[in-house]
Image (cartoon, grey):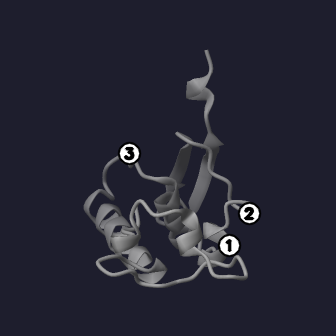
């Protein structure tokens, strides 16, 4: 997940400006959105290069990082990807993404069937 540095554990209101919009600040000892995206992109590139001959790769992540991964893999505007109303993520949701040389395709999105009894 994105490092909030000195804002870790603080109320969410500390992350928003008076207009209610997200502030892309870099908290002391933390990351801003662009730092987070750069780190996630490096991770994805490493996985895609290192494991390209493997059939399946399983990644576990927090919701914010899932949103960043989707923005990178599918070239979604990062502001839209971070907007929980436009790209909702349920807790413990599963995404299955098929990546081939020619395409990237979401097979399962925001699935929580594993929670059903």
* Residue located 61% across and 68% down the image: 82
State the image quarter where residue 28 is shown.
Answer: bottom left
Q: Is residue 38 left or right of residue 24?
A: left
Cβ atoms at labels 1 and 3 below 8 Å apart: no
Q: Is residue 34 above or below residue 4?
A: below
- Residue 108 x, y percent position in the rendering: 62, 44
Q: For the residues marked 1 and 3, what is the alpha-carbon distance in whole angstroms?
A: 25 Å
* Residue located 59% across and 76% down the image: 78
- Residue 58 x, y percent position in the rendering: 38, 45
Quadrant where the image shows the N terminus: bottom left
- Residue found farthest to the top: 117
Please, what secondary structure does the residue beneath circle 1 have?
Answer: helix
- Which residue is labeled 1 in the image? 80
* Residue located 32% across and 67% down the image: 43
State the image quarter where residue 42 is shown.
Answer: bottom left
Disc 3 crowd rating (10 Å Cα; few below 14, some 14-19, many 20+) is few
State the image quarter where residue 55 is shown.
Answer: top left
Judged by depth in the image, the label closer to the viewer, 1 or 3, is 1
Cβ atoms at labels 1 and 2 below 8 Å apart: yes
Q: For the residues marked 2 and 3, what is the alpha-carbon distance in whole angstroms?
A: 25 Å
Q: For the residues marked 1 and 2, what is the alpha-carbon distance in whole angstroms?
A: 6 Å
- Which residue is labeled 3 in the image? 58
């Amino acid at each position: 997940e994105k490092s909030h540095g000195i804002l870790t554990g603080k109320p969410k209101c500390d992350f928003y400006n008076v207009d209610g919009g997200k502030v892309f600040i870099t908290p002391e000892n933390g990351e801003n959105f662009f730092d987070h995206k750069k780190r996630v992109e490096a991770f994805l590139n490493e996985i895609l290069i290192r494991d390209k001959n493997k059939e399946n790769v399983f990644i576990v992540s927090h919701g914010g990082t899932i949103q960043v991964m989707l923005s990178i893999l599918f070239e979604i505007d990062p502001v839209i990807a971070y907007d929980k109303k436009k790209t909702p993520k349920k807790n413990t949701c599963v995404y299955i993404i098929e990546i081939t040389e020619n395409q990237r395709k979401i097979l399962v999105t925001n699935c929580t069937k594993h929670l059903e009894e």
